[in-house]
Amino acid sequence: MVFVGAFLAASVAPADAGSPSRTGNLYASGQFPAGKTYAVEEVIGLNEGALPNPTYLTGQFLCIESRADQALFTTYSKDGDELVFGKLVLSVTFFSNRPPGLHAGSLITATSSDPLTIKAVFRRNDLTVLTAESWSLPPKQNNN
């Protein structure tokens, strides 16, 4: 997986205009600007090139590598007791909103009210590789 991480670092295009800036505000659940939303099954068929801005992704993803403000995820399935990695790999940048306890092996779920923002799509052999950003406010802690 180190190769994939190195590939992503070399392939990431600059962020599109129209996204909040790195110092901009994060979005509350359900408060994202209107845009095109893709489920995992739909995004695998996307071609490289310009996407409407904003473009969102929903689905459940398995973390395979985690760093301070970025993590690498994949889709997955189970075959009996065996875990099978999918054909989608995504690098997600977090902006002071990293999910608590995120580590290799944990799951995240991007929903229509808290999606990931797709920045770029690449096709490499039989993989679809995405760069994405998380602009969701972290969930509020319930102290009861």
Image (cartoon, rainbow, N blue to C red):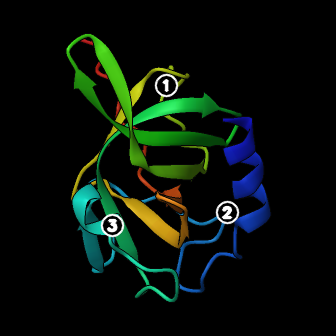
* Type of amino acid under label 1: Pro
Q: Position of residue 7 (x, y in %)?
A: 73, 55
**Label 2 vs label 1, nearer the camera:** 1
**Residue 19 falls left or right of residue 12:** left
The image position of residue 18, as x and y in percent, is: 53, 84
Residue at 64% across / 71% down in the picture? 21
Specify the label residue 43 is tagged with: 3
The residue drawn where x is 28% and y is 56% is 40
Q: Residues within 10 Å of mark 3 (few under 14, many from 20)?
A: some
State the residue position of label 1: 100
The alpha-carbon separation of the residues under discs 2 and 3 comes to 28 Å
Instruction: Decide which of tag 2 and tag 1 comes sooner along the chain.
Output: 2
Q: Amino acid at mark 2?
A: Thr
- Which label sits in the foreground, 1 or 3? 3
Dot 2 alpha-carbon crowd within 10 angstroms: few under 14, some 14 to 19, many 20 or more: few
Q: Which residue is mark 2?
A: 23
Q: Which mark is residue 17?
A: none
How many discs appear?
Answer: 3
